Image (spheres, rainbow, N blue to C red):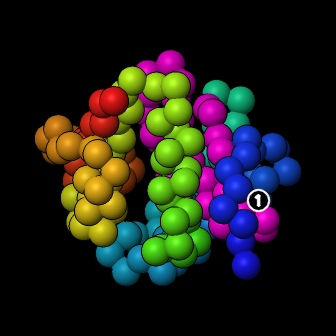
């Protein structure tokens, strides 16, 4: 069973984080795969030195990526839902911050419900960044 311990990610965690994202993509019927699994891992490697990345579990079952300069949650992925993984990661992201924002897909109603439970509010739809085509919703949290 995964421990609900959140820790700062290391470069050694990148393949496990990529596996969580790729598992989510493969399991999500409405989300098209536009990047190969290797490209996803490459994105994580590029982001590693630019973002604050936290992981949960041993082995890793989820991660959150935050742009610390602007308070943007760039990614929150968990291998399973309903186990408190996402909440623990989001709680870590909120520590020491007065505000956060994120984009989630308009079609991802489960994520929207989760973020609203965690205090985020809708702030309007935003256009997707190519090559993505799915509409996104900006959500904001303030302490």
Residue 18: say if magenta: no
Q: Any magenta on residue 69?
A: yes
Residue located at (20% from left, 43% from top): 121
Farthest residue toward the right? 12
**Residue under the image location 36 percent in, 41 percent down:** 102
Residue located at (61% from left, 32% from top): 51
Query: In this rendering, does residue 105 appear at all?
Result: no
The picture places residue 104, in percent across and down from the top left corner, at 32, 52
> Is residue 8 rendered to the left or right of residue 131?
right
Residue 88 at least partly seen: yes
Q: For this view, does 57 lie left or right of residue 112?
A: right
Is residue 46 left or right of 117 when viewed as pictured?
right
Q: Position of residue 42 (x, y in %)?
A: 69, 48
Task: Say which residue appears at 29% left-offset and 45% top-offset.
Answer: 119
Q: Nearer the viewer, residue 93 or 102?
A: 93
- Pick out the residue farthest to the left: 124
Which residue is at the far top? 69
Q: Which residue is mark 1?
A: 15
Instruction: Work out whether 92 lies above or below 116.
Output: above
The answer to which of 43 and 114 lies nearer the viewer is 114
Q: In what element is the residue under mark 1?
A: helix
Main SS, magenta region, reads: strand
Q: Which residues are magenta?
A: 51-77
Q: Position of residue 21 (x, y in %)?
A: 57, 63
């Amino acid at each position: 069973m995964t421990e609900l311990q959140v820790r700062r990610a290391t470069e050694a965690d990148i393949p496990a984080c990529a596996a969580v994202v790729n598992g989510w993509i493969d399991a999500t019927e409405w989300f098209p795969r536009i990047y190969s699994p290797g490209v996803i891992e490459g994105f994580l490697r590029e982001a590693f030195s630019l973002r604050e990345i936290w992981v949960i579990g041993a082995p890793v079952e989820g991660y959150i990526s935050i742009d610390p300069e602007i308070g943007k949650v760039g990614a929150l992925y968990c291998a399973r839902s309903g186990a408190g993984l996402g909440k623990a990661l989001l709680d870590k992201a909120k520590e020491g911050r007065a505000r956060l924002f994120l984009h989630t897909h308009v079609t991802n109603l489960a994520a929207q419900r989760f973020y609203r439970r965690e205090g985020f509010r809708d702030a309007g739809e935003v256009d997707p960044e190519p090559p993505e085509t799915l509409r996104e919703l900006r959500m904001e949290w303030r302490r």
